[in-house]
Image: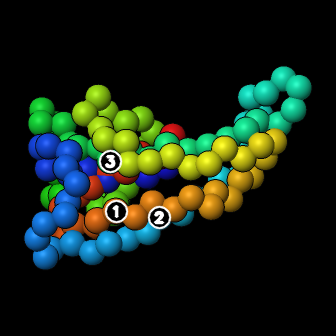
Amino acid sequence: PQSVSSSSVVRDFLDGDDFTRIELSIKCRGLQNRDWTSKSDPFCVLHLQEEDDDHPLDYNNDHDVSPRARLSKLPSKRSKELGRTEVIKDDLNPNFTTTFVTNFIFEERQTLVVR
């Protein structure tokens, strides 16, 4: 899972020239088995998370050395679901075929959350 944060309102970044379209694919390795009678049936949900107005992400923070596109464990209350993968039965190392196409905005931190 990775995070990407947007401006104060989560939006579908379709206007302007300062972005490029990217395609994301997801695979998982070594998932914990959560089923009792067989292996888990995993799927992923992708969220675009906006930064918290009370705690904006600081590009100049020396302790924040992560790239602009980051992973986060939990979506915020103000996140937007971008899509879901298919369910893969009985697999703890799934390679999902569903891909996600979204805009990568240059000079702006975006947070994607994969759950």
Circle 1 residue: 102
Task: Find residue 104 and report its horizontal and vertical position in percent.
Answer: 28, 67
Q: Nearer the viewer, mark 3 or mark 1?
A: 1
Front-most of residues 114 and 87: 87
Marks 1 and 2, Cα distance to the nearest angstrom? 8 Å
The answer to whether residue 63 is above or below residue 104 is: above
| CB-based contact (under 8 Å), mark 3 and mark 1 | yes
Q: Amino acid at mark 1?
A: Thr
Label 1 residue SS:
strand
Marks 3 and 2 close (CB-CB < 8 Å): no
Q: Quadrant of residue 19?
A: bottom left
Question: Can you give x and y, in whole percent of width and height, for residue 4 in the image?
Answer: 31, 53
> Marks 3 and 1, Cα distance to the nearest angstrom?
10 Å
Left or right: where 4 falls relative to 40 = left
Q: Secondary structure at mark 3?
A: strand
> Which x, y percent locates residue 34?
74, 28
Give the mark nearest the N terminus, 1 or 2.
2
Quadrant assignment, res 66: bottom left
Nearest the eye: 12 or 36: 12
Mark nearer the N terminus (3 vs 2): 2
At label 1, counting other C-alpha atoms closer than 10 Å, the crowd grade (few under 14, some 14-19, many 20 or more) is some
Give the residue displayed 28% in from the left and 65% down from the top: 103
* The quadrant where residue 37 appears: top right
Q: Which mark is residue 48?
A: 3
Please give the name of the residue rendered at 20% of the width and 60% of the height, measured from the top-left corner: 13
Q: Which residue is mark 2?
A: 24
